[in-house]
Image: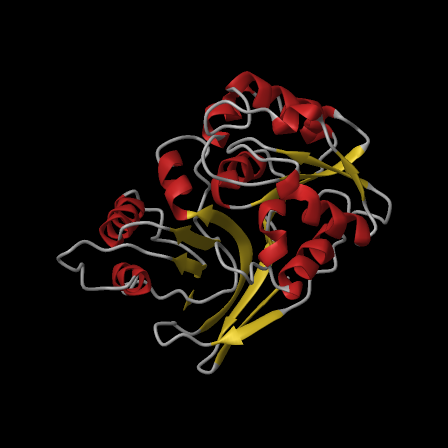
Amino acid sequence: MQQPIPLQKDDLIALSAPARKISPEELQFAIQKIEEAGFRIKLDERLFASENQFAGNDSIRAALLQDLLDDPKVKAILFVRGGYGSLRIIDRLDFSGFVKSPKWLVGYSDITVIHAKAQQLGIQSLHASMPINFENNTDESLQSLFDALQNQMKPISFEAHPLNKTGDVKAEIVGGNLSTLYSLLGSELFPETKGKILFLEDLDEYLYHIDRMILAFKRARKLDNLAGLLIGGMTAMNDNTIPFGKTAEEIIAEHVSEFDYPVCFGFPAGHIIDNRAICLGGSLHLKVERNQAIVSA
């Protein structure tokens, strides 16, 4: 897949809100961090529009993102937060200019919809932290984002999880938020998984629904021929009064136990403080050993 041009110092980064609304106060810390990293910021007054939970109605959110996709001065678009809303506007957008001159699209969670579109078009994008989270992120998380924007990603090593399946594979990585991908299942936006490393993470889901979604992926043959499976944060999961009886990780491990590709849990990405950047659509080397796992470009 095509990689957008790496950013240089003083390049222009624009902010977009395709889903939940945001206030200027919530962005002050992130703006400071982006400027300290050596980049300029583009803010549009439409960024702070509000309609119920959304950052303005669908037309406003789509129009702002369209303008940023088409602006040749903008070298990267950081989506300020997730929530819900990207799916409502994705089919309103014209990506023809973006394909001719790709730029980095950066975010996670609900932004998985936009990542899926970028990969459908053959363009890499960054699954990484968003401005709403910057104040609580680790230094390593933010540095990984700025490194990725400049094509300087560093290897990430982390402790082995007891449910891991060892292996060593290098392949293209796709995926993102499990619930958001579930909403794309059966559509042209669901990423091709055959021969790929599939990355999944999620937040605030009931355990039985994790089971349902993974089973849906399996029944749709999306888990059959992976090169590998990489699981990030499965954060703040919910259970019923009568327990489901398994953790999210145990549910996933059970349903992929028949496959022989490497499976790695506990990767530092997702709805967690230490949310490291991943270049979706890019090549990733996943090495799962008995005592540790290593992810590198």
Residue 40 visible in the picture: yes
- Picture colour scheme: secondary structure
Q: Residue furthest right?
A: 10
Q: Is residue 227 left or right of residue 68?
A: left
Please identify the quadrant where the C terminus is shown.
bottom right
**Residue 277 in view:** no
Q: Residue at x 28, y 63 (%)?
A: 247
The residue shown at (70%, 22%) is 67
Compared with 247, 202 (above or below) is above
Which residue is depicted at the point 62% across and 61% down? 141
Q: Position of residue 119 (x, y in %)?
A: 56, 39
* Number of dots carrying numbers: 0
Along the line of sight, which residue is nearer the eye, 105 or 51? 51
**Image x and y of residue 17, in percent:** 59, 32
Looking at the image, which residue sits at the far bottom?
Answer: 291
Tell me: residue 191, above or below residue 241: above
Give how far across and how far down residue 10 sits, in percent: 86, 45
**Rendered view: 180 above or below 297:** above
Q: Nearer the viewer, residue 118 or 8?
A: 8
Across and down, in percent, residue 198 comes to: 45, 53
* Quarter containing the N terminus: top right
- Left or right side of 152 for 91: left
Q: Compare residues 273 and 7 and report the one nearer the observer.
A: 273
- In this rendering, the answer to whether 44 lies above or below 126 is above
The residue furthest front is 25
Extreme residue in the top direction: 59
Taking the spot 42% from the left edge, 74% from the top edge, the residue there is 166
**286 relative to 96 in the view: left or right:** left
